[in-house]
Structures are given as C-alpha cells and as structure tokens.
Amino acid sequence: MIVLKVLGLIFWLLAVPFCMGLLPMPLLERRLRTPGVAFIAGYILLFTLFELVGIPVVLCALYNGFTILVKIFTPLALLCAMAGIFVTWKSIKGGKEYDFSLLSGLRESAWEEKLIIGLFFLLVGFQLYMAFVNASFDGDDAYYGAQALIAQQLDTLYRVNPYTGRSSPLDVRHALALFPIWEAYIGSMCGVHATIVCHSAVPLVLIPLTYVLYGQLGKTLLGKRKDLLPMFLFLIALWQVFGNISIYTTETFFLTRTWQGKSFAGNFVIPAVIWIFLCLGKEETQEKKGLWLLLTCLNFAGGASSSLAILLSCLMTAGYGVLFAFRHRKPGILIKAGLSCVPGGAYVLLYIALTHGWLVP
C-alpha cells in the first residue's frame, strides 16, 4: 500500500507536470527544449489549469466543491499530459531537436567543476533530508494546512473556518489562492493525509524544482561561461542554508515553509518572471512565442500561491516590458507584455470585486 502511495505521488508530482510541460516545447528554441525547462513549464501550466478550473468551483459550489474540482481537473490534467507527449513525438518526427540529456556537458567539464557540482548535490540532498526529517511548523499551519485537510475531509472549499471548525461565509481573502487545495488534491489522488503531503511530500519536489529554475537562470545569465554554472548553483545552495537571518527571508520560507503558497510565490513565481525576460532579452532568441505564452500563464498561475504574487508578476512584466521595448526599439513588446497581463488583470479585478463586496458568491 505504501509503495502504491509513493508511486502515486511520483506520478502526480513529477510525471504529470513534466508531460504537461512538453506542450509548449515546440514553440521554444532548441536550447530551451530540455527536461529542466519542461519541468518548470509543467508546473506553470499545471497551476494555470488548476486556477481556471478551481476558481469557478470555489465561487459557485457551496457543497461538495472538492469532489467537483477533482472530477473536472483530473481528466483535463491527464489530457494535457498525454497531449504533451503526443506533441513532442510529432515535433521530433517533424525534425525538431530536443536535448533530453541530464547534466549535459558534465562529462567534458574539468574535475574542479565536477567537484563543485558534487558539493552542490550534497547541499541539496542535505536540505531535502532536513526538510523531510525535521519538518518545521509555524502559526500559518493552523490556516493553510487546516484548509487542505478541510477540503480533503469535509469536501468544501474555503467555507469552513479552520480556527473554529464551523461553517462560515466564503473566505474571499484566500479563496482565489488554491495552493492548499492543490495539496489536498494530491493527497486525495494518492490516498495520503493532506498534512503529510504538505510537510513531507511537497518539499521533496518544490525544492528541486526551484533549483532547476535557478539553474536555468544561471545558464541564461552566464551565457557562454558555462564553466561557472556549478559555482553559481553551489553558492545559491549555500546561501539558502545560511539565509535564516529572520523569519521573513525567502530562504527561511524556502526551507521551512516550502508547502505554503507565499513561499512558492517568492522562490518560484518571481524568479520565473526574471528568467523568462532574460531569455526574451537575448539577441539570438528567435522563437519567442513559447516564452510569451509561458509568461501569460505564469501571470495567472501565480495566483494559486498568493493573490499578491499576481500583482507583483504583472508589475514586473510591465516594468521589464518597458525596458525591453526601449532597448530593442520595438513598441510591439509593450503590446505583448500588456496582453500577457490580461489573465492576471482579470484575476486582480475579480479579487477586488470579492473583497469589496461588489460580487457576492
């Protein structure tokens, strides 16, 4: 039974997101068609789909909302995963090249680089071990962890007060951020208690996912100096270990509150916006449709982690869009940046309408 649950977690936390991330690969240039980018894109698309399905269910379903969400989201997620596999197969047959090798170029690297990348993996392994064995608890668990458990056991979404256990009106402040509901969904699909998913399973996936994103950031920033990438990753991992200088740093959230949406917002959503714009800003980048598509999805998917994350990502998109439009002397970049903010803008308007009482679910 435990083996089946572990396989279920691997399927829903790794296999399905990765296959979903294959969908936009043909729209990206050759250097971005890698397993790491597919993994990042998969989680962006997964949370985009989860928000698209989940928000109407949260607002409209007074009872059995979680069951309705599971019945709608599950076939759509599986369909997207299968579509990703099919699209990849077709594009490979059509002549597009993919780089499916892991740690490509490591064999040809110098022994110093291999040593440093080994130290990096040791640091990451240490972080994963500590996150799993010494799970941290804080006051927010009384809300976020409880909301995941309420969805799983009471089959309702944000309509029970987690502090008292009594029925309450829809919690409009948090209702659009479905990160705890996603964790409840993973637990429900795998037969695992929601609290175990939050504190034990999710960190084992989100911590490596974040380092994959940092790896892509490093590759983009360093350009042709790929020999510096191992040291970049090692310093990032070392910084994370010693970043607990207050309870508010992103490093503290990254390693001690990994399962909370605000941690995902600060450690994945915001860096992902920076990475996408760094890729867009490269002169040699020709195929940009996929990057703009990912940015549009990210500006909506960030709402799963925190409503503030969407506002920040859209503001960053606007700011970077202006900078790149001036740099490249292309006003069309402003139009594309504005269009990528439309889903996020709709999310923000819905949030304002709910919190100000203009829309009563």
Image (cartoon, rainbow, N blue to C red):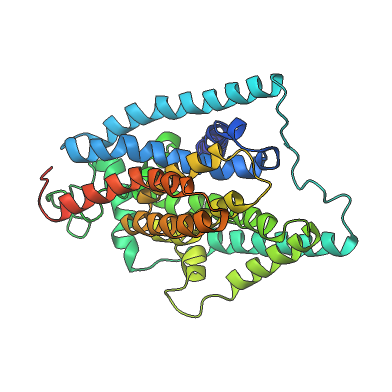
Of residues 286 and 260, the one drawn nearer to the viewer in this rendering: 286
Tell me which residue sits at (83%, 59%) in the image.
114
| Residue 227 locus on image (x, y percent) | 81, 60
Q: Nearer the viewer, residue 162 or 44?
A: 44
136 over 348 or under it: above or below:
below
> In the drawing, does residue 243 fall left or right of residue 122?
left
The image quarter in which residue 98 lies: top right
Farthest residue toward the bottom?
245
**Position in image of residue 91 (x %, y %):** 65, 23
**Number of marks drawn:** 0
Left or right of 67 in this view: 187? right
Q: Which quarter of the figure has residue 155?
A: top left
Q: Quadrant of the C terminus?
A: top left
Q: Position of residue 125 (x, y in %)?
A: 66, 59
Q: Quadrant of residue 288?
A: top right
Which one is in front, 142 or 211? 211
Q: Residue at the location (39% across, 47% down)? A: 338
- Is 8 located above or below residue 261 in the figure? above
Determine if residue 86 is in view: yes
**Residue at 72 percent of width and 23 percent of height:** 95
Q: Is residue 337 left or right of residue 282?
A: left
Residue 128 in the image: state x and y as whole percent. Answer: 60, 59
Report if residue 171 is visible in the image. no
Q: Is residue 120 left or right of residue 71?
A: right
Q: Residue furthest front?
A: 329
